[in-house]
Amino acid sequence: MSELFIQGPNKLSGEICIHGAKNSTLPLMAASLLCDNECILHNCPVLSDVDTSLKILRYLGCRVQRLGNDVAIDPSSADQCKIPDSLMREMRSSIIFLGAIVSRMGKAELSFPGGCELGPRPIDLHLLALRKMGVIIEEDHGCLKCSAPDGVKGTCINLSFPSVGATENIMIAASCAKGTTIITNAAREPEIWDLADFLNSCGAKIYGAGESTVVIEGVKSLSGCEHRVIPDRIAASTFLAAAAITGSTLTVSQIIPEHIAPVIPILEECGCHFDISKSSMKITAPKRLGRVKSVRTMPYPGFPTDAQAPVMAMTTLSDGTSVFIETIFESRYKHVGELLRLGANIKVEGRVAIVEGVSRLSGAPVEAADLRGGAALVVAGLAAQGVTQISGLKHLDRGYESLEKSLASLGADIKRI
Ligand code: UD1
């Protein structure tokens, strides 16, 4: 069991190239199952969740190869329609394979994803939509047995909440459905746009991705394609928070600045300055950060729930009181208890967290309970006096490629032991 040791406080400097987006890579890998020929995905991050998706594709019968950040998926030999419980448990978001499997095989069987570190993980919106598309779904002893005897059919789906995963599952299932599917109140996250871009390159007819209404005209078949995964906006936001709390000047490159736009005003409110170019941004942080009045997590283009924990860690050293309101997930404050161990002053009342900035954090042993909560501990550890020892790295490894190497190359004193 390895742990991270950070000797702080550290200033960061130089340039960090951001890896491909985990949350884009997973649906793209699932969508590739629909194609007749090989798909090549460039800029895939080396992460445990991506490895789990590769295992799922192999289990389904695809030929899969990975070379560094390139992944080749040949789905022509796929012949299985089941995802075993062990793989579903490894990655709750494996539900993203449901639409692809049922569309390709006419049936699918996988275990119910159940709860996760962020609280209950309902999939009712996914199931409601697929049922509307003609998929018969039986929920039996924690297992989902799905079949589409007459094929998947296009229809109108109004999502009661713009769920990212449900929008993706519907788009994938609808790409080769009979007829046209119209999704209203669709999620507008950049990853939705990337998925549509990939599917359209394979021959799908998807219009309006990135807007609230997405129209998908079903096509008979999809070819393969080569596609470059978009940069990870949450990894970029994490490095910006790390630069901000340490009073650093850092260039974050290979990004799409527009995707990070919801986070920038918060950092500016704390006193950070930005020089933004086409694919990079330079952050210059003040000696001491100011407070941020309120951060409310919202669907895109609102402030991303995934950036809440690292940005909260950043405000623990701010001058003043910052308020966070988590509206997306129920249990997304697990990092708070660990930040308190580092000397932060945070109170949680339901979905609201109030951070009273302190003048000093001090290193301590802490444990990551989830992916972004783990990133928050790294952000705080970089600014804390003395050694911060972080366990629970399996969570961090789900979403950040070689985090400690990247931070060490920017001047941090950080080691994995
Ligand atoms: C995706 C991201 C995750 C991010 C989240 C919100 C991936 C792999 N994960 O997760 O990192 O935090 O978007 O931006 O892309 N909900 C239901 N019923 C459903 C589906 C969702 O009630 O059928 C609820 C969830 O419990 C949650 C909210 O809707 O409260 C948002 O979930 P959703 O947008 O679906 O997130 P994911 O796609 O799971």
Image (cartoon, rainbow, N blue to C red):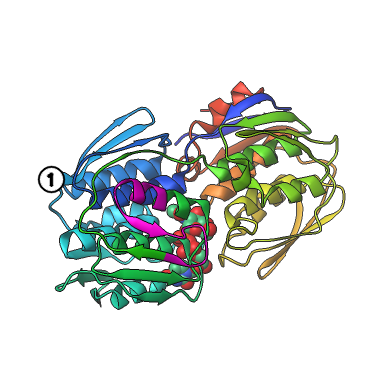
Q: Position of residue 40 (x, y in %)?
A: 30, 36
Q: Is residue 156 left or right of residue 211?
A: left
Identify the image quadrant of residue 299.
bottom right
Queried whether the magenta region covers residue 206, the answer comes back as yes
- Please give the range of residues in magenta: 196-214
x then y, percent, for residue 282: 71, 32
Which residue is more in the foreground, 162 or 51? Answer: 162
Q: Quadrant of the N terminus?
A: top left
Viewer-nearest residue: 409 or 388: 409
The residue at 42%/38% (across/down) is 47
Task: Looking at the picture, tell me which residue is in the foreground, 49 or 78.
Answer: 78
For image coordinates 36% across by 27% down, the residue present is: 68
User: In the image shown, does 305 or 398 lie closer to the viewer?
Assistant: 305
Q: Amino acid at mark 1?
A: Ser
Q: Mark 1 highlights which residue? A: 77
In the image, residue 11 sits, relative to residue 104, either above or below, namely above
Question: What residue appears at the point 49 percent right and 31 percent down from the top-left corner?
Answer: 402
Q: Is residue 76 left or right of residue 154?
A: left
Look at the image and say whether residue 1 sits in the magenta stretch: no
**Which percent across, then down, holds residue 407?**
60, 28
* Residue 8 visible within the image: no
Q: What's the residue at 18%, 47% (across, down)?
A: 36
Residue 56 is at least partly visible in this image: yes
